[in-house]
Image (tube, rainbow, N blue to C red):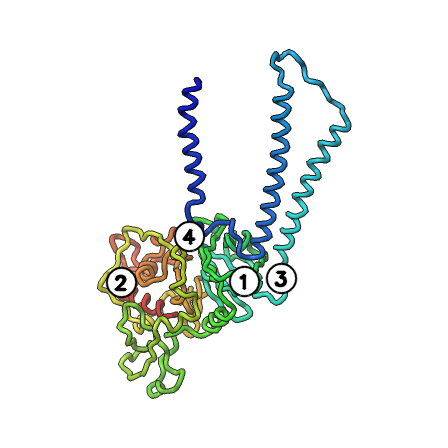
Amino acid sequence: MTRDLRMRWLTPALALLLAVGLSACNSFTPNTIFGAHSEFGHSVDLLTRRLLYLGIGVFILVEGLLVFILVKFRDNDGTREAQQIHGNTTLEIGWTLVPAVILAFIAVPTIETIFKTQAKAVPNALQVEVIGHQWWWEFRYPQFGVITANELYLPVGRTANFALTTKDVLHSFWVPQLNGKRDLISNHTNYIWFTPDSSFAWNGFCAEYCGTSHANMRFKVFTVTPAEFDAWVAHQKTNAVGSAPPPAAGDSAKPGAAPAVLSVATSTGASTPAGKDAKAPVATPVMSVADTSSSTYPRTKLPEWVIPKTPIPAELTFDQNAEGDVARGATLFKTAPCIACHTIRGVPTAAGIVGPNLTHVGSRTTIAGGLYPNDLKHLELWIKNAPAMKPGSLMPLFGKAEKGATPGVYTDQQIADLAAYLSSLK
Ligand code: CUA
């Protein structure tokens, strides 16, 4: 290759390298591992840096010596034979000892960090049980009797101790900016703990291939102030809003007796309570969405990247004229197949444990294991045809047959009612 030709390639090659390099620091990367926000993250960060700097030192030393020797002892004629040093005890001890010492420098802090971050329990920690399912996350707070799914709330500054297990296959719990990964293994509990240092909304992932929708097994972590956390817990402990049994006639004036039915986006704001006789004159307190938002991470503060933008499968359609009714949905839900798999506290018939606990599903930001935003449109399509929305979904299809699909049981109108009801469970 002539010098000219070489120069012709060098410039574009350097430009490409520069472009690739600069694009790496282009924008905010929410899922980076290089931005620790817990002491777990900091200790892993520190370890990574130590090892990186040590590695750079060794690299420079070795390569420097190599280049120095190559230049200094260059044999231009190619006639001399290099000096043979086989059997030099001093040298052999030297090149055995030096790597051993270097490895010790790597091993000691590494093992120390592994043991420190695998400690089973931290005294006074917030206890959280993490249970992996294909393909969603169950979170239990045994100290408070709260069970939720796909969204974790953690108080800033308090250590959270996670006990990890799985209901089916291997999964791995990972919130890139808060902690390292830890596997969820059947018949064995793994532990991990960390203390969030700042208030924010974080993305979490399954980091162990677990089947068709492994990449669709996501969750959110909302780190909030201790007071906000207490408010969230207090709210999560309550029965589902709008799901309480309808008050008997004349009971409606009793404080707390009437169910507070949330008006959802599509309803008129004057919902009737759940019950067979929707005409009964009941003074139903209608809460606005803002009333419960004090206990959840404020929607206005949600970073844009927290809400998934998963495209809806093109073949899925929904009757645009079907307007959901909370009361009708509540009545329908009580005997719907949904109750075989889902629990809604306050609805006696709904006690299934195969699927996510839906007691406050309306207060969550996402559905379907973090795959779609939690709004009526996505919820309706999800109920209608979950397997089309999420490959391998264990939740079956419930929409009535459309273009040769397996027949489900519900019309779009019924599904709209169910979705309106579920959305009202803030
Ligand atoms: Cu669960 Cu991958």
On-image quarter of the C terminus: bottom left
Q: Residue at x 61, y 67 (%)?
A: 124
**Image vertical order of residue 256 relative to residue 354, above or below:** below
Label 3 lies in ligand 1 vicinity (Cβ under 8 Å): no
In this rendering, position of residue 118 left or right of residue 257? right
- N-terminal label among 3 and 1: 3
Q: Which residue, given by chain and number where applicable, does mark 3 sit on?
A: 121
Which quadrant holds residue 288? bottom left
**Image vertical order of residue 371 relative to residue 268, above or below:** above
Which quadrant holds residue 346? bottom left
Residue 8 visible here: yes
Q: Give the image location of residue 150, x and y in percent.
A: 45, 60
On-image quarter of the N terminus: top left
What is the C-alpha distance between the residues marked 3 and 2? 48 Å
Q: Give the image location of residue 104, x and y in percent.
A: 69, 42
What is the C-alpha distance between the residues marked 2 and 1? 37 Å
Question: Which is closer to the viewer, label 3 or label 2?
Answer: 3
Question: Which is closer to the viewer, label 3 or label 1?
Answer: 3
Q: How many residues crowd mark 4 within 10 Å: few (<14), some (14–19), many (20+)?
A: many
Q: Residue furthest bottom?
A: 250
- N-terminal label among 1 and 4: 1
Q: Residue at x 45, y 52 (%)?
A: 30
Q: Decide: marks 2, 4 in contact (CB < 8 A)? A: no
Instruction: Say the numbered circle drawn on residue 412.
Output: 2
Q: Secondary structure at mark 2?
A: helix
Q: Residue furthest left?
A: 321
Q: Decide: marks 1, 4 in contact (CB < 8 A)? A: no
Question: Which is closer to the viewer, label 2 or label 1?
Answer: 1
Q: Give the image location of residue 79, x and y in percent.
A: 64, 11
Question: Which is closer to the viewer, label 2 or label 4?
Answer: 4
Q: Which residue, given by chain and number where applicable, does mark 4 sit on?
A: 216
